[in-house]
Amino acid sequence: MQFIGHFLAFASVFLWSSLYVCVKILLEVFTPLELLFLQFIIGYCFLLLICPRFLKSTPKEELYFILAGLSGITIYNLFLNLAMDYSKASNVSVIIATAPLFTALLATFLKIEKLSSVFFIAFTLCMGGIVLLSYEEGGFSLNPLGDGFALLSALGWATYSLLILKIMQKTNHLLLVTRRIIFYGILGMLPSFLFLEFSPNLELLLELNTALNLLFLSLFASGLCFVLWNHATLLIGAVKTNVYVYLTPIITIITAFFVLGEKLSILALFGAFLTLFGVILAESKFSKKP
């Protein structure tokens, strides 16, 4: 079961990272809010189609679903898209990569899991590698608003990771729970319509390239990946699952190399090595207190 959990965590991160190309293409024709709303509406309909039953829950369980939807769907995804609009992708990727640390700190504070100093050494290695992966000629440029959005996004994902662990320990209705969480995430986006632009040109969906990219993004990133991630969290815990977030920049860069023809520098390769070493160290028995 441990192997299955690690495989599902890697598969979900691999798909999320690989679909970065779809996001990049679609943000040229839709605003961050338009893209987010459309992709999750389609993702929700997809999960409803394959599992048309409805979930029965208690008021307490419903509260957990609402909080998970707001943190993991609305806050994480909306602020991530906004951060990409205001700040450099390199800055955003480094800040988002702090999500596993926030997850570990929250898990330790709430006495869900215990960590040793080795985990934080592994975190330092991963972050050092990610900085090298994200470094561009001319260095980094700070954008307080964009970088602040990215930090809120990372905090949202850390909160979601612990909430989903609590939720999945009390139910085996994986698809139904994921769909309910996505539903509340969509509702959480509605107040944003008062502040952010939302007037999608639906005629663009008649263009094959746009339609296919949105379909792939919706079915995988907004549907299947959440199902895989939630199941992985149940099997191996929130902290271990979140370690795979460190691999996101590596997978994204490799995808960009093959799909977009972007260059892969020696510095980036060294950064990838540091990050992978950090992930292995974080997953080792030495990083967990008995």
Image (cartoon, grey):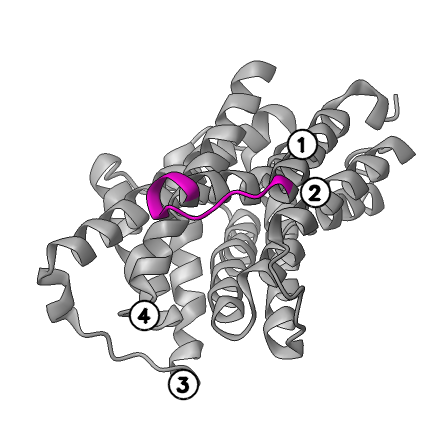
| Quadrant the N terminus occupies | top right
Q: Which of label 2 and label 3 is nearer to you?
A: 2
Disc number placed over residue 129 in the picture, else none: 2
Circle 1: residue type:
Phe
Q: Mark on residue 34?
A: 4
What residue lies at 34% left-to-right and 43% top-to-bottom? 259
Quadrant of the rendering where the C terminus is positioned: top right
Q: Are marks 4 and 1 in contact (CB under 8 Å)?
A: no
What amino acid is at disc 3? Leu
Residue under label 1, please give it. Answer: 273
Q: Give the alpha-carbon distance from disc 4 to disc 1, as whole Å.
A: 37 Å
**Within the magenta stretch, is there residue 265?**
yes
How far is disc 3 from disc 1 in space, using C-alphas? 44 Å
Q: Which mark is residue 73?
A: none
Q: Secondary structure at mark 2?
A: helix
Of residues 110 and 247, the one drawn nearer to the viewer in this rendering: 247
Name the residue carrying label 3: 194
Residue 274, above or below 288 = below
Instruction: Evaluate if marks 3 and 4 touch, with contact meaning CB atoms under 8 Å apart.
Output: no
Q: Is residue 46 left or right of residue 139?
A: left
Q: What residue sits 29% from the left and 70% below the top? A: 30
Q: CA distance from mark 4 to mark 2?
A: 33 Å
- In the rendered structure, which disc, 2 or 3, sits on the residue that comes first in sequence? 2
Q: Could you tell which of marks 4 and 2 lies nearer the N-terminus? A: 4
Closer to us: 251 or 13: 251
Q: Write the start and end of the magenta stretch as one range.
A: 257-266
Disc 4 crowd rating (10 Å Cα; few below 14, some 14-19, many 20+) is some
